[in-house]
Every structure is written in structure tokens, then in C-alpha cells.
Amino acid sequence: MVRVAIDVLLKDEILDPQGQAIERALPQLGFEDVREVRVGKHVELTLPAGDDLAERVEAMADQLLANPVIESFTYRVLDEDHDRAR
């Protein structure tokens, strides 16, 4: 079994109102130098390892996790020691 992290973001040409709201609020908290904030979703899942892992992850993202018209995604296989909690 492997743990996979998938990150989905709006494409660069799509307006991101959440990202803009955060970007406007950060200077009020003293973070004046932050630019180009984008907000997305992070999905982690465990599935069986196999030669077709990349194909399966991409199919899941294309068919359910991301809207390919307005969103793009990246994924990575997490190692066993990956700390998911803060």
C-alpha cells in the first residue's frame, strides 16, 4: 500500500477569490511581502502499489477530484515517515 497526496488548484488564468481575500488580509497581520496566493484542496489516500499507480491516480483526479476545465493537479507518493499533522 502507498499513501498518495493530490493537490488541486485553480488554473492560473482562473480568478481565485479566496486567494485574493487571503492576500488582502495578510498585510493586516504583518505579512506584507506575500503575493499571488492561490487556495486549493489537498487530498490524501492510500491505495495498492502497482505499475499502474500513476495512471490510477491521474484517472481519479481527472474524473472526480479536479475539474480539468478550471483546475490542475499535482500528486506525489508520500513516504512512511510523512508527518500529516502539525
Image (cartoon, grey):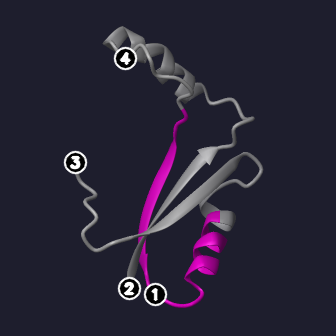
Tell me: 85 left or right of 40.
left
Q: Specify which label sits upstream in the sequence, 2 or 4.
A: 2
Tell me: 5 left or right of 57.
left
Tags 2 and 1 touching, CB below 8 Å: yes
Image mark count: 4
Q: Residue 49 carries which label?
A: 1
For disc 2, the marked residue is 1
Q: Crowding at label 4, few (<14), some or many (≥20) Cα neighbours within 10 Å? A: few
Q: Crowding at label 2, few (<14), some or many (≥20) Cα neighbours within 10 Å? A: few
* Residue sticking out furthest to the right: 69
**In the image, which is nearer the foreground, mark 4 or mark 1?**
4
Tell me: 76 left or right of 59.
left
What span is colored magenta in the figure? Answer: 38-61
In percent of width and height, residue 59 lies at 66, 73
Q: Specify which label sits upstream in the sequence, 2 or 1.
A: 2
Residue that appears at 28% across and 64% down = 82
Q: Which amino acid does label 3 sit on?
A: Arg
Q: Which amino acid does label 4 sit on?
A: Phe
Real-space Cα separation, disc 2 to disc 4, in angstroms: 40 Å
**In the image, which is nearer the foreground, mark 2 or mark 4?**
4
Real-space Cα separation, disc 4 to disc 3, in angstroms: 21 Å
Tags 1 and 3 touching, CB below 8 Å: no
Q: What residue type is labelled 1?
A: Ala
Q: Residue 86 carries which label?
A: 3
Q: Specify which label sits upstream in the sequence, 4 or 3.
A: 4
In percent of width and height, residue 63 lies at 68, 67
* Residue sticking out furthest to the bottom: 50
User: Does dot 2 land on a helix, a strand or a loop?
Assistant: loop
| Residue 57 sits inside the magenta stretch | yes
For disc 4, the marked residue is 31
